[in-house]
Amino acid sequence: MDWALGVEAQAINNKLKIYSMPSNKEVPRPDDAPDFSAIKLIDYDTAKYGSSTERIRLLKKWGDEVKNLPR
């Protein structure tokens, strides 16, 4: 695990032109990788939408309003 999270291992993706974001901040971001600071992200409420109650509500809503629609 130490090796996989290290600079040497995470820099391999750059050499292979796999433009994923490295989790190690010492590895430079590839030029073709997305710049997440420039992307507008949604403000996701993990506590609300990750709860069992909300999951059940959303699955029921999906079933009632979408899944059962005629094809």
Image (tube, helix red, strand yellow):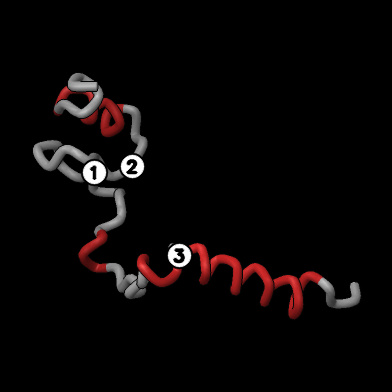
Contact check, label 1 and label 2, Cβ < 8 Å: yes
- The image quarter containing residue 16 is top left
Locate residue 52, reporting x and y percent: 51, 63
Contact check, label 1 and label 3, Cβ < 8 Å: no
**Mark 3 Cα-neighbour bin, 10 Å: few <14, some 14–19, many ≥20:** few
Is disc 1 placed on a helix, strand or loop?
A: loop
| Residue sitting at the far left | 26
- The image quarter containing residue 38 is bottom left
**Mark 2 Cα-neighbour bin, 10 Å: few <14, some 14–19, many ≥20:** some
Residue closer to the observer: 69 or 36:
69
Q: Which residue is mark 1?
A: 30
Q: Earlier in the sequence, mark 3 or mark 2?
A: 2
Q: Amino acid at mark 3?
A: Ser
Q: Does 28 sit above or below residue 2?
A: below
User: Can you tell which mark lies on residue 19?
Assistant: 2
Q: Amino acid at mark 2?
A: Tyr
* CA distance for labels 1 and 3: 36 Å
User: Can you tell which mark lies on residue 51?
Assistant: 3
Locate residue 37, reporting x and y percent: 21, 64
